[in-house]
Amino acid sequence: MLLIPCPWCGPRDEAEFHYGGQAHVPYPENPAALTDEEWARYLFFRDNPKGPFAERWSHASGCRRWFNAVRDTSTNEIMAVYRTGEEGPEAIEARPFTPQPGQAIPARPAVEDGAVEAEGGPGGAAPGGVAGAEPLQDGTGRGGGGGNLPFRHPTRGRVDRDTPLTFTFDGTEYQGHRGDTLASALLANGIVQAGTGIKLGRPRGIFSAGVEEPNAVVQIEAPFPEPMLPATTVELYDGLVARSLPGQGRLATAPDPARYDAVHAHCDLLIVGAGPAGLAAAAAAAGSGARVILADDRPEPGGSLLGTAEHLDWVAEVTELLAAAPDVRVLPRTTVFGHYDDNHLLAVERRTNHLGADAPENVSRERVWRIRARRVVLATGAHERSLAFADNDRPGVMLAASARTHLNRHGVLPGRRAVVLTTNDSAYAAALDLHTAGVTVAAIVDTRPAPGEWAQRARDAGIQVLPGHAVTGTRGDARLTAVTVAPYGESTGQREFAADLLLVSGGWNPVVHLFSQAGGTLRHDETLGSFVPDTCRQAVEVAGSANGALDPAAVLAQGAAAGARALTAEGYTPRTPRLPTPAAQPRTTPPMHVYVLPGAPDAPHFVDLQRDVTVDDLARATGAGMRSVEHTKRYTTAGTANDQGKTSGVLAGGVVAELLGVDISALGTTTFRPPYTPVSFAALAGRDRGALHDPVRTTALHPWHVAHGALFENVGQWKRPWYYPQDGEDREAAVLRECAAARDSVAFMDASTLGKIDVQGPDAAVFLDRLYTNMMSTLKVGMIRYGVMCRPDGMVFDDGTVIRLAQDRFLVTTTTGNAAAVLDWMEEWLQTEWPELRVHCTSVTEQWATVALVGPKSRAVLGALAPQLAVANEDFPFMAWRDTTVAGIDARVCRISFSGELAYEINVSPWEALALWEALHETGAPYGITPYGTETMHVLRAEKGYPIIGQDTDGTVTPQDLGMGWAVSKKKPDFIGKRSYARADTVRPDRKQLVGLLPEDPAAFLPEGTHLVADSELPAPPVPMLGHVTSSYRSAALGRTFALALIKGGRDRIGERLYAPVGDRLLPVTVASPVLYDPEGARRDG
Amino acid sequence: MADTALTAPPRSPLSHAAARLAAATRTSGGAIRLAELPLLAQLDVRLDAKGPAADTVGLALGLQLPLAPNSVVHTDRATALWLGPDEWLLLGRPGTQRDLENRIRTAAGDEHVSVTDVSAQRTTLLVTGPRARDLLSRGCSLDLHPRAFGPGRCAQTTLGRTQIVLVARDRPRAGFWLLVRSSFAGYLVDWLLDAATEYI
């Protein structure tokens, strides 16, 4: 959502504005002097540059002022705004690209490489003294605090062992604990397989511990069905029922009973991610007076620190600080999923999902946050990357840091006996921690020939390290049983290790999704072997491992610095937060950049586990000539599943680069688009459902219509009575009855929805003369004139009546659906073209309720209720208006007829409309007064050939086409549309003209839209079409069906027979004058 | 002749919703208060802010028409809202619209001043209570923090899917007035009561 700065009201959401096209295209001084080509150029031709473009905009939902804006059409940036009549700026500069400041301050030498974790930062310090890390007592895991869960660690993790929860997965009931995810609870029960591959059907296991999960995507069945949720993000609750999926889920067939809503929020600083970097930024910002929002997708802050169990005291300290700080809002369980223009970010907060059936009914289940932030710090962490090796998809293959997270966050051992495969140092910290917790680490297989100090630390702990080795294959069906290892790049020297867990680390991908969505550019970082943020035009800074920082101290320092910089830029004074001091780290060894590991040629090397895309598939793509990752993505579907390639995207790029023999930095990444993680349509719809989806506008008389059984027609947003069926009548019968009442006696209708605009000022008459095709300045006070309004191209745009209230005051009416558009139209011309005219226009649509009183007996009814009003024809002639009282209510009565009958429109305050209506109903009762709806109104007007703008016209119809040349002034020097009536196109003899149609069978009904052809037999296609039916009705007065149609050269065809294909028949019809009833107008005066 | 019509009191657009608004106010336990302020006098006033009429009209009304965009001037008798650089909405007690209009027209003399009675065009809702701001943030994209939208501020914007004129009342924590087109008032009440579900 762009912010557009209204020159009067300041920045507002773009939804408040209407676009008005190119600015500075003045209405020609003298259109009559222009050639057809010059006039057409004014009408139809506009510039379309790439880059800065001066445009007109109207603050339509605000102050209704038109203004000019210079917008860069390639970026949508609004570069300048200025008021109508002001000169545009001479030189305009686009917002600069700002490099990420974090990159300018490497806190430590880059070689001092540490482990990184998802969710907010790195973390992987060596697991120094983790207190209470006792190995499991026995292989079944009984005893300890884990209850009967064989893989629950007795002490580790943040789960509440006193709150057991029961859940069902694939039909089997299990126990878990509060604080588990569905994935960790399954692991605690020894279940690692959580699905099957979508194409090949191979068993798939829990692969990660977060949103990046490609495998364990499950279907929730109860309490409410929800498809495709990563089990690693589903918080466990009592009564959860889920099942594994072969790739795709099932939507509920019953309506979702939960509430979803949305909320707007504003802040000086939004921090995305509450890991070490995000918490440090928040700690720097808290208490400064700035408004801060900290959003994190997990139930509690801490990010990767919870996965490594480091500095938890500091996490608690900052969490407390933030809770106590005014103007700081912490949003847990909130995923920021979109970063749009002008720092508008969307997030979804899962408010009650984790409560299962206990969720309160009146609290929304999920809430969409629409956050407008002055500054944004993205501390979104990094995702561990996988490797493409043979049979790398067996359940039990898991990202290394994720296994550590399951241990420390959830207190589960993902397996008993592990092999670790890595290309970098970060997996060592995970291996050491799991080793300490009781997992047997059979070997660490490192592709690097000389892994350095970290490897030494592992050896010191008694773990075998195989430098310069790689995994060449795996065995096992439902679960991994063995891992084959060989020296890297060699087929000899293979060794097999029995293992139920294979931990993999292929390096780290900074989570740059939001930065990229914000318009940020990426660059390839050679050290990291991945893409990191580079420059951005928005006020956004990336901190921590999302910025490629790998060292824990650097992550914390970057976070604090980013928070401080953002606050300073907004004029606040940041604090210097206390940051923890990470323990001394072993010297790091640079990672090895490798994507595909050699292995058995017939064994699949999976790249995208969720889409079952292998290295062979990518090779087919490059073999077919693809040279771009965007193309290989679409050819193979790699990266298109609901995990959007979080673990596989860069891997796929690396594989394609190897296949093409180019550097991955030259290939770049595929485009990151919102949402970062899937968001349900229910959440996006929020409360905009049912009656709240689209406002219903009602008149003051609406309750009466409802009480009297009206059926309603939607006209724009209005509910208008359509007809009032009585005693089981169908529509046809009801409408015939209502029509007959209006023609024979008296009927009345709620016409309050007509648009009404008060036009005041000394130049009001001049203004209306320019807007309408006919002359308004000659209208006398006390009289009314019908008027037609056209666009400059001469096509009818609206019609209505003009009432002259005083010399300098008019009341104009518009069609129901066009009221706002007509007022905008008036303001546009007044403000941009004719600012010298002293005229003001004000909407008074709802200031007046209008009742149409129609029929030969209407005079009698009105006369009885308006004793002070002389109602005789000579006293109160057609197209006159009178102020009087009707039923004791102040009223303005107009003699207007939209039916050809004697008729009045009675305008009163809507506060008194019901009293008026009931008085008319009562007084008219002796005459059988009948309420009628829009259908009857349409029949009555069509019998008289009165067009409905928007039904009988479609923006290609001139007043002359409608047979209303009489309403187009020949005397006025100019009015909007006049010049176009001299264009060759508008004087063509074969223009479509409005005519009547009479089917030869008086009972045959022509559906609206029916085409008309010349011959009784259809020729071979293409069939020449003469026109189409615009309105079609059954007429009580004519005793037959009839229609209005736009027909080529229609007026010259009156009396001709044409044919209308209806179904498989060609119905003969006769072209007639559009005025079919009372053509001499004898009924108008009663 | 329908005698009842002569004595029927005027019906405000939300008279039928009064009970629902009162019930929500009651059950929210003080979190929110919702009520219609029915039948207020409302006049749309247009004049050149730099011309002589601005002062004479202001004098006649006993208030200075606010010149800063989106600001409000309150007096005991009337409230003037900035709607545009040459447009104001004047609010007064029920029944005072004719008097206010006459005073403005008299003060304007021959100047180009437009006055339009729009008392029935919109109705006014009071939204107040500790959760009032939260409630409106469910559908209003403006920053309603007291720092950004405190007493003395007004704005024409959208709430949910309808346009409103939003007025911050003249004391801190006194909540808001919402002016809404009468035909949309029923929708807006449905929207507000649904938004308040969490509190009621």
Image (spheres, coloured by chain):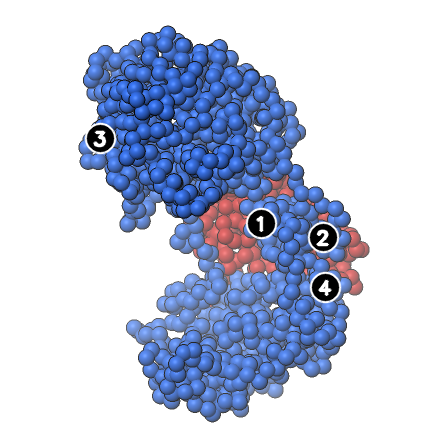
Chain colours: A blue, B red
Q: Which residue is mark 2?
A: A83
- Specify which label sits upstream in the sequence, 4 or 2: 4
Q: Which residue is mark 1?
A: A14
B138 relative position to A447: left or right: right
User: Which numbered disc, 1 or 3, marks the residue closer to the eye?
Assistant: 3
Chain ID of residue with mark 3: A
SS of the residue under disc 1: helix
* Residue B117 position in % (x across, y down): 63, 61
Going by the numbered disc 1, the residue's amino acid type is Glu
Chain ID of residue with mark 1: A
Q: Is residue A594 visible?
A: yes
Q: Which numbered circle lies on residue A1076? A: none
Q: What is the distance, in whole Å, between disc 2 and disc 3 at their CAs?
A: 70 Å
Q: Which residue is mark 4?
A: A26
Q: Is residue A414 visible?
A: no
Q: Which numbered circle lies on residue A478? A: 3
- Specify which label sits upstream in the sequence, 2 or 3: 2
Q: Is residue A46 above or below residue B68?
A: below
* Residue B197 position in % (x across, y down): 41, 43
